[in-house]
């Protein structure tokens, strides 16, 4: 039983390794890019639209609604980043229904990379919305004594994002693998469905937390 897709090596040459994490990450990226091209190539206005466009519009509207409810007045500005985060994690976890597939979100390297994108996006959006000086002053709230604690908070929440997603996905995969080896019939199927539900919830939570961090960084107050 593998604890992580990092342990599944497809090809190795010296220090270079091509493991399941990389392969399945590339696969998910390819599917998202190909799907976006195919779905958006014949977009239409009006009542008569394709079923794919209908599904796409529902997903986009729901994501925008969630972003706006968090406190962002212009959700379309953050849709590309937050929507991509959600779709990548959701599709990665959804494909666990395919035999032989291992979600890249079960690797700490993948979840750390996703968390680092949020870590970079927060100040980028903050500076773009508030300006460089005002954004830096936000670290001194409510007093300059809070500066080191606010900086530490930025680092710890990034670590928390990575570890939370990794821990939930890895533990779910381990439980299913153990149950399959002990009771290889009906009960593991139930756990597989519950694991799939957990994966969708984790995609939602990760995206919502990223939205909250960006909303806090772009909030306009009298600084």
Image: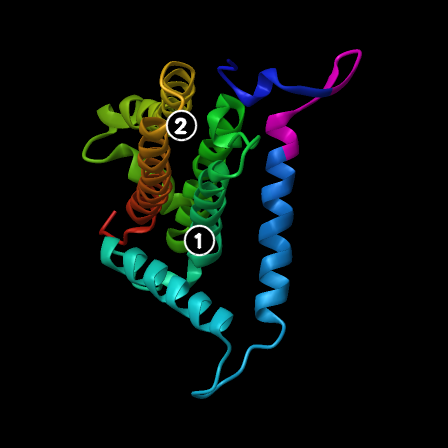
Q: Is residue 14 left or right of residue 189?
A: right
The residue shown at (50%, 24%) is 107
Q: Nearer the viewer, residue 176 or 138?
A: 176
Viewer-side label of 2, 1: 2
Q: Nearer the viewer, residue 207 or 22?
A: 22
Q: Is residue 189 magenta?
A: no
Q: Is residue 196 left or right of residue 26?
A: left
The residue shown at (39%, 55%) is 129
- Which residues fall within the magenta stretch? 11-23
The relative height of residue 209 versus residue 113 in the rendered view (above or below) is: below
- Which color mode does the image show? rainbow
Name the element at disc 1: helix
Query: Quick one: label 2 or label 1, which is nearer the N terminus?
Result: 1
Q: Nearer the viewer, residue 85 or 105?
A: 105
Name the element at disc 2: helix
Q: Residues within 10 Å of mark 2 (few under 14, many from 20)?
A: many
Q: On the image, numbered disc 2 is attached to which residue?
A: 169
Q: Is residue 12 magenta?
A: yes
The residue shown at (64%, 57%) is 34
Residue 138: which numbered mark, if any?
none
- Asked whether the beta carbons under mark 2 and mark 1 sit within 8 Å of each other, the answer is no
What x and y, as percent, mark residue 176?
39, 23
The relative height of residue 163 versus residue 190 in the rendered view (above or below) is: above
Name the outermost residue toward the front.
185
The relative height of residue 193 versus residue 82 in the rendered view (above or below) is: above
What x and y, as percent, mark residue 181?
42, 15
Q: Is residue 131 left or right of residue 21?
A: left
Q: On the image, numbered disc 1 is attached to which residue?
A: 83
C-alpha span from label 2 to label 1: 20 Å
The residue shown at (51%, 77%) is 50
What x and y, as percent, mark residue 108?
48, 22
């Amino acid at each position: 039983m593998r604890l992580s897709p990092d342990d599944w090596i497809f090809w190795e040459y010296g220090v270079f390794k091509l493991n399941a994490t990389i392969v399945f990450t590339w696969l998910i990226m390819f599917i998202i890019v190909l799907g976006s091209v195919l779905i958006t190539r014949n977009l239409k206005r009006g009542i008569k639209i394709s079923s794919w466009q209908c599904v796409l519009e529902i997903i986009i509207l729901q994501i925008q609604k969630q972003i706006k409810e968090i406190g962002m007045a212009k959700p379309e500005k953050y849709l590309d980043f937050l929507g991509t985060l959600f779709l990548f994690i959701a599709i990665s976890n959804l494909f666990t229904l395919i035999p032989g597939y291992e979600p890249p979100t079960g690797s700490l390297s993948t979840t750390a990379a996703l968390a680092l994108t949020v870590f970079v996006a927060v100040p980028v959006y903050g500076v773009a919305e508030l300006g460089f000086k005002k954004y830096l002053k936000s670290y001194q709230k409510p007093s300059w004594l809070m500066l080191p604690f606010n900086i530490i908070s930025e680092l710890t929440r990034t670590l928390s994002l990575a570890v939370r997603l990794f821990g939930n996905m890895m533990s779910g995969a381990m439980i299913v693998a153990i149950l399959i080896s002990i009771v290889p019939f009906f009960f593991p199927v139930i756990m597989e469905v519950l694991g799939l539900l957990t994966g969708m919830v984790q995609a939602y939570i990760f995206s919502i937390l990223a939205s909250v961090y960006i909303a806090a960084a772009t909030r306009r107050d009298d600084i």
